[in-house]
Image (cartoon, grey):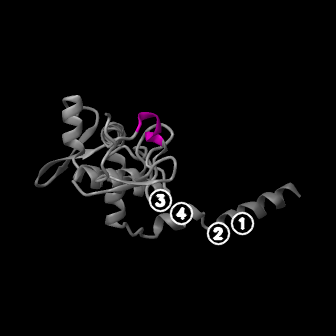
């Protein structure tokens, strides 16, 4: 009886090829764009070095890093910190090296940019204790509870920094414009 069970199991094992054997003999199509995206996410330290997949939030963060680079992240980091060490990786291309902002560099840029936004709102007459309660005209918060600009806050501050008139709501719900004169201190 034991011999029959052993013979049956040996026969079943030989009858069907293992699943990994079938997969190994099937050619795998490699998507070049996917591989490039994975490499960039790894190099910028958005995902772990050995990760094979990313989440939608990782791809969204990659887009925000690229926009920050275009908005002057390197200049702000150099101005405030003095160098880019630890905040940038040099990506090698056939044409040379290109600086890429890392996740750590982006976090530092967001902090510094948020500090500048706080200063801007104070200059606009907003009391410091109310700055983190400001909202855009649609009611979206401009700052997180930790004092960092939200994506809506980043967009509004970017427009304001470009000299474009912007509007926001104060904690009472009143819509204020960057062109609104402040009450005099007299």
Q: Nearer the viewer, mark 3 or mark 1?
A: 3
- Gap between marks 2 and 1, in whole Å? 7 Å
Element type at mark 1 = helix
Residue identifier under label 2: 16
Q: Nearer the viewer, residue 154 or 85?
A: 154
Who's the residue at 43% across and 40% down the image? Answer: 131
> Label 4's element?
helix
Tell which residue pokes out farthest to the front in this image.
186
Lower sequence index among marks 4 and 1: 1
Residues under labels 3 and 2: Cα distance?
Answer: 38 Å
Which residue is denoted by mark 3 in the rendering? 56
Give the image location of residue 156, x and y in percent: 34, 54
Span shown in magenta: 127-132
Badge 2 density bin: few <14, some 14–19, many ≥20, Cα 10 Å: few
**Residue bearing mark 1:** 12
Left or right for 13, reference 168:
right
Q: Are marks 4 and 1 in contact (CB under 8 Å)?
A: no
Is 131 in the magenta?
Answer: yes
Report the residue at 31% width, 59% height from top: 36
Q: Give SS at disc 3.
A: helix
Badge 4 is on which residue? 21
Residue 141 seen anywhere in this rendered image of the structure? yes
| Residue closest to the eye, 5 or 108 | 108
Q: Earlier in the sequence, mark 3 or mark 4?
A: 4
Q: Residue furthest left?
A: 95
Inter-mark Cα distance, 4 to 2: 10 Å
Please say if the residues under marks 2 and 1 sit with CB atoms less than 8 Å apart. yes
């Amino acid at each position: 009886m034991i011999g029959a069970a052993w013979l049956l199991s040996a026969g079943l094992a030989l009858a069907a090829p293992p699943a990994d054997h079938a997969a190994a003999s099937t050619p795998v199509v490699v998507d070049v764009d996917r591989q490039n995206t994975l490499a960039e996410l790894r190099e910028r330290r958005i995902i772990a070095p050995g990760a094979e997949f990313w989440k939608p939030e990782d791809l969204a963060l990659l887009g925000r890093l690229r926009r920050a680079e275009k908005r002057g992240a390197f200049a702000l980091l150099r101005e405030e910190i003095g160098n880019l060490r630890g905040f940038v990786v040099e990506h090698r291309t056939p044409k040379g090296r290109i600086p890429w902002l890392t996740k750590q560099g982006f976090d530092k840029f967001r902090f510094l940019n948020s500090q500048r936004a706080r200063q801007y709102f104070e200059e606009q007459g907003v009391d410091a204790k109310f700055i983190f309660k400001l909202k855009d005209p649609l009611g979206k918060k401009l700052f997180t509870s930790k004092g960092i600009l939200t994506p809506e806050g980043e967009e509004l501050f970017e427009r304001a920094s470009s000299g474009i008139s912007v509007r926001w709501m104060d904690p009472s719900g009143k819509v204020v414009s960057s062109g609104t004169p402040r009450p005099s201190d007299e």
